[in-house]
Image: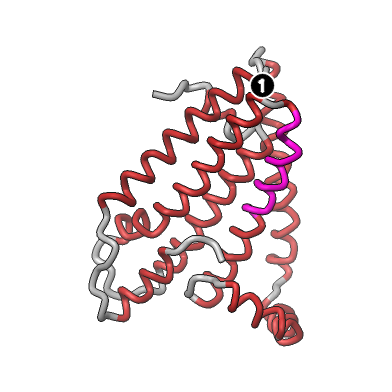
């Protein structure tokens, strides 16, 4: 079992925190998409099935990056951009999923960019004061959370020595990835292929664009 001290460390390391944020963003987006599906008998199980591949990717990557940061001090030059790219992809994918109910693809993003003028007009119509205020506030909280948590743990005399910190994060992220792999392995890949609900399920199942 992974050490208990490893779980909060996933929120204090920049690369791990971004990947956890990517996973949470994906879960929220697909949970919202589930609300659009009619006739779902077991939404919790369906959501677990839908996000299992995403969690396998994000936490598997988090474990790999933690292992690199544990062994090489300059690994952050590689791990930080990778984690940043992952969270940007997750945010774009989730936004598209919530807006359309369909899984994003590169082709869909290309069409979106080609019609950026229409997208801007639509965004201006639906953007409320509360939403305009909530977005920057959410970004500030997202940045402040790991900094405040790390400061708190330092006051509790936690050590963030790379070997210890990286090992704990690697074990915790690896455990989550392994659990996700079990879900992927035991879950049937197709259910009710002919129904509209099953088509919406498959659109939620995929990974990033």
Q: Residue 148: give x, y in percent of width and height.
A: 71, 31
Which residue was labeled with disc 1? 162
Residue 85 painted magenta: yes
Residue 43 painted magenta: no
Q: Which one is nearer the viewer's eye here, 157 or 26?
A: 26
Left or right side of 116 for 19: left
Q: Residue 23: give x, y in percent of width and height.
A: 52, 50
Q: Quadrant of residue 155?
A: top right
Determine the main secondary structure of the stretch shown in magenta: helix
Count of numbered circles on the image: 1
Residue shown at the point (49%, 71%) measured from the top left: 103
Q: Which one is nearer the viewer's eye here, 133 or 188?
A: 188
Q: Residue 66: give x, y in percent of width and height.
A: 60, 32
**In this view, 149 is above or below 134:** above
Residue shown at the point (49%, 42%) measured from the top left: 60
The image quadrant where one finds the C terminus is: bottom right
The image quadrant where one finds the N terminus is: top left
Q: Residue 86: give x, y in percent of width and height.
A: 62, 53
Q: Farthest residue toward the top?
A: 157
Left or right side of 53 for 138: right
Q: Quadrant of residue 159?
A: top right
Q: Which one is nearer the viewer's eye here, 50 or 134?
A: 50
**In this view, 68 is above or below 125:** above
Near mark 1 (Cα within 10 A), the count class, few <14, some 14-19 or many ≥20, is some
Q: Quadrant of residue 110?
A: bottom right
**In this view, 21 is above or below 36:** above
Residue shown at the point (36%, 73%) measured from the top left: 37
Magenta residue span: 74-87
């Amino acid at each position: 079992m992974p050490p208990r001290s490893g779980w909060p460390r996933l929120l204090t390391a920049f690369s791990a925190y971004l990947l956890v944020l990517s996973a949470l963003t994906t879960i929220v987006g697909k949970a919202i998409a589930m609300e659009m599906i009619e006739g779902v008998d077991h939404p919790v199980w369906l959501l677990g099935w839908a996000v299992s591949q995403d969690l396998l990717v994000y936490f598997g990557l988090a474990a790999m990056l933690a292992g690199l940061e544990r062994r090489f001090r300059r690994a952050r030059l590689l791990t930080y951009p990778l984690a940043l790219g992952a969270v940007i992809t997750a945010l774009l994918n989730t936004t598209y999923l919530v807006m359309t109910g369909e899984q994003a693809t590169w082709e869909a993003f290309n069409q979106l960019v080609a019609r950026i003028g229409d997208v801007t007009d639509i965004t201006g119509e639906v953007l409320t004061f509360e939403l305009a205020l909530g977005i920057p506030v959410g970004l500030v909280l997202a940045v402040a959370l790991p900094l405040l948590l790390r400061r708190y743990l330092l006051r509790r005399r936690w050590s963030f020595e790379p070997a210890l910190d990286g090992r704990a994060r690697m074990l915790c992220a690896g455990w989550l990835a392994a659990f996700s792999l079990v879900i992927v392995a035991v879950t049937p890949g197709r259910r009710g292929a002919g129904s509209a609900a099953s088509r919406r399920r498959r659109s939620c199942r995929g990974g990033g664009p």
